[in-house]
Image (tube, rainbow, N blue to C red):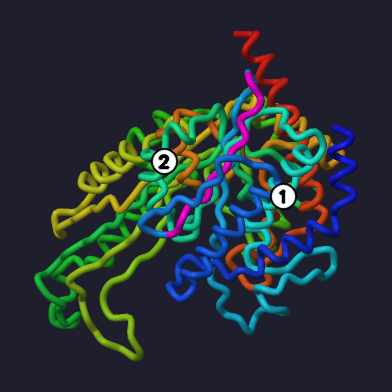
Amino acid sequence: MQQVLTYLEANRDRYLIELKEFLAIPSVSSQTDHAKDMRRCAEWIAQELQKIGMQNIQILDTPGHPVVFGEWLGASGKPTVLLYGHYDVQPVDPVDLWTTPPFEATIRDGNLYARGSTDDKGQVFAHFKALEAYMKNGGSLPMNVKIIVEGEEEIGSDHLDDFVKDHKDLLKADLVLISDSDMFAKGVPSVCYALRGLSYMEIEVTGPNGDLHSGTFGGTVHNPIQALTEMIASLHDKNGRITIPGFYDDVQPLTKAERQAFKKLPWNDKKYAKSLGVKELYGEKGFSSIERRWARPTLECNGIWGGYTGEGAKTVLPSKAYAKISMRIVPNQSSEKVAKLFEKHLKRIAPKTIALKVRNLHGGEPAITPVDSPGVKAAVAALERGFGKKPLYQREGGSIPIVVQFKKLLGIDTVLLGIGLEEGNAHAPNEYIDLNNFFGGIRTFAHFYNELPKFWEASRKKR
């Protein structure tokens, strides 16, 4: 291990040169004029995997952009980790808001600025360098590794499900490892072990059979906008709880240990409110802001429209009104069940004065990996060694659909070991990766590959 760490330290300058080369490829998956760049980026990764000593390297075509695969399976009797990442990046617009060109990686104030630096090329590349350090210092790894790097994450990974289904044997592993997320804060290493899911609905309310003159007909017809807003307003009570019957029945409560772990995080409600420009925070009573962000379900109105919204006045009583509602769900909840409860409740409370349609637009399931699992334990040990301090535990309020899909299609859990920062401008101009996180991440990943077999074997002995 010491040889590996010495090698990592000695090659820091080279890593930055190589990473800049990787980041220079404008692999924007959403724009057809970058199709050749997408292929070129996949080929760059394949060549990199060859250089660092991986085997069975393949560029596998999909109906969209290709997937790059590589592996090293020389550790007999040791666990196999499936390392997932993506090489596609977001568009760079508006370009004029970038301080330096988005595909010319530039170092300023200890940060490396470029599109893809944190999401996700920089984090994937850090893994490549950790693996390289082992292969160049002994020619082997402490465990088996399979690598899959896709090119469509930023456009919804539309073809990844079918790819995984068609390559189950190729991707068979004991654990998925993903570095495409953030640490809790700068200088605060953390391991993420749970994600919320999503149930996304659309409501259509119809009143009269056409738009009406609000003077002539007002007072005799229930305005669909009013009816809709009355229904939406009733979906929370005065304590911020969701009023849909059965909504909380399957919610997995936080353990005492989890709540204590969250209290250790450097969090301040007043600073958080100030950063958002609000005078006071809002949410379900009886829970902290962090608990409400990560571990409690929510219901939010994401959009509402109807009637006349153009310039000037138009005295119209509209025929229709619409709203989009998202519900973030937590472990043990089902997106399909929540959607059915939502629709049933809306139909129950809808006034007879209107007609109602409820559409389930899409959903995704929550995910959780037990904190006492070998993967999470290895991540905790690796972060402490990589960053020199004990890491904290966190959940994530958003969703990463591929985590659920890997569980569903391959039957394996995921460890989220990200080294980005929330303020790193992913998807925005001036995206960057903190170089302390980058180099600390390489060390952390090297330790993870060394630590996982130990915890895995200990877990097997307990069983």
Q: Residue at x 14, y 54 (%)?
A: 352
Which residue lies under the disc numbered 1? 126
Q: In the depicted view, which residue is nearer to us: 429 or 333? A: 429
Find the magenta span and give its range.
Answer: 65-76
- The residue beneath circle 2 is 164
Q: What residue type is labelled 2?
A: Val
Res 392 quadrant in image: top right
Quadrant hosting residue 277: bottom right
Numbered tag placed on residue 250 in the rendering: none
- What is the three-letter code of the residue carrying label 1? Ala
State whether residue 458 is above or below residue 225.
above
Position of 272 relative to 141 (above/below):
below
Q: In what element is the residue under mark 2? A: helix
Placement of the N terminus among the 4 image quadrants: top right
Q: Residue at x 68, y 38 (%)?
A: 191
Query: In this rendering, would 420 be left or right of 61?
Result: right
